Image (spheres, rainbow, N blue to C red):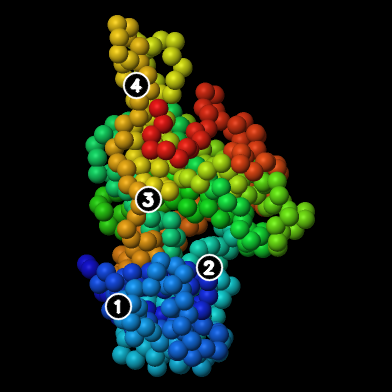
Amino acid sequence: MTAPHCDALVFFGATGDLAYKQVFPALQAMIKHGHFDLPIIGVARSGWNLDQFRDRARDSLQKHGGLDADAFAKLSARLQYVSGDYQDDATYEQLRRALGSAARPLHYLAIPPGMFESVIHGLAKSGCVRDARVVVEKPFGRDLASAQLLNRTLHKSFAEDAIFRIDHYLGKEAVENLLYFRFANTILEPVWCRDHVASVQITMAEQMGVQGRGAFYEEVGAIRDVVQNHMLQVLALLAMEPPTDGGPDAIRDEKLRVLSAMRPLAPTEVVRGQFRGYLGEDGVSPSSQVETFAALRLYIDNARWEGVPFYIRAGKQLPVTCTEVMVELKPPSRAIFDADDSGRANYFRFRLSPDVLISIGARTKVPGESMVGSATELIAHHSPGDEMTPYERLLGDALRGDAALFTRGDTVEAAWRVVDPVLGNAVPVTSYEPDTWGPAAAELLMADGDQWHNPALKVASP
């Protein structure tokens, strides 16, 4: 059954950084593409008026994505503004009046999780949760216990199917392409198991440091920032069983099953690193033990993947900015040709950023009399960019009630169970030099015969 479309968008934290950099550009793009024609009510504690709020939207678009005069005029005409404290009942009474005849609003909480309870209580008391949906931003907790508490808070007023936990990474074209390629083609399924896959690697590398956000990074670190959410979600897409259909719950059910089968990490399976110079960043404690790099090895205890190592690596101040998946296949059972060759076996390579690339590694014969081969990479798909931004896609999905690209509460908790044992200082931090691939200790995580694949920014690498 098709879910009803929302008839108004309310976003809390409307004067904040997220709205400025992401929400306004997404709304203008949706209007420009003919995908949005609803009232927009911004709610914030700033004592602004509507004209100031419209000026903020204009400034946002001039700095992030470009101002489209026609689309902005339509956006501006739809804007309303409610100013008030999130703990004051009067704020929600103003919101109720602003909603007018709207009966199915989407409430977007672009605010810190610590404010969720006050806002949800205010919405419920004012009658604004009836037939409504709510979008919440990550982080979905700091550990398993806080994630469970957050879910209980949300469930006081919203059913699970009305809660949309937004992770912008799942809205990227490349991540959707990974899911599509995996299940729309028959070439993968026969080899996508422990009988043929030797190992799987996911690397999320960033050349930049913390970019003046030291105080924020002190609260999260690499494992909380990208591993528990982005990278485990990508791993789930790679490793899950085929869903019964393309519906949201079928896909999310299979993600839950594979996350639940992941063995919780042990300290011996994790390396934490901190780039040299991090301690000098503004907002960073001189004795900080927060990781800017994490590498880990994990296993999935099910029939398909038993014994196959999955390697995850994420870090800042690395040689390139690139996210890439490498699925290494086992060599042929008998080496008929190239018996002494030590080159890379067959593989599938999925680049998720900065461009979208799907390629297959193979060996082809070198011209001449001898039966000698060389490594070749066959490019199945290459795209330079994404026409739709993640926030445009995800906001549109939430308004339609399509939850496929959003994280379900039980899946959030399953992911925290994997990383919970190694949070904090369970694993010591080792320093590494900027523009390297992290601490040397990361090499020790590799099983016999495995080695890290370091992404290089070129279309193909022989």
Per the model, the C-alpha gap separating discs 3 and 4 is 28 Å
75 with respect to 212 (left or right): left
Q: Quadrant of residue 162?
A: bottom left
* Dot 1 alpha-carbon crowd within 10 angstroms: few under 14, some 14 to 19, many 20 or more: few
Per the model, the C-alpha gap separating discs 3 and 1 is 32 Å
Mark 1: amino acid? Asp
The residue at which mark 2 appears reads as 150
Task: Please give the name of the residue rendered at 65% of the width and 38% of the height, measured from the top-left corner.
Answer: 439
Seen in the picture, residue 407 relative to 124 is either above or below; the reply is: above
From the top left corner, tell me how far across and down residue 364 is, in percent: 31, 20
The residue at which mark 1 appears reads as 70
Q: Nearer the viewer, residue 278 or 264?
A: 278
Residue depth check, mark 3 versus mark 1: number of the one nearer the observer: 1
Seen in the picture, residue 449 relative to 409 is either above or below; the reply is: above
Seen in the picture, residue 239 relative to 45 is either above or below; the reply is: above
Mark 3: amino acid? Val
Per the model, the C-alpha gap separating discs 2 and 1 is 40 Å
The residue at which mark 3 appears reads as 175
Q: Is residue 161 visible?
A: no
Mark 4: amino acid? Arg
Residue depth check, mark 3 versus mark 4: number of the one nearer the observer: 4
Task: Please give the name of the residue rendered at 44% of the width and 10% of the height, measured from the top-left corner.
Answer: 340
Of the two numbered discs 3 and 4 on the same chain, state the one appearing first in sequence. 3
- Tell me the element at label 1: helix
Q: Is residue 435 visible?
A: yes
Of the two numbered discs 2 and 4 on the same chain, state the one appearing first in sequence. 2
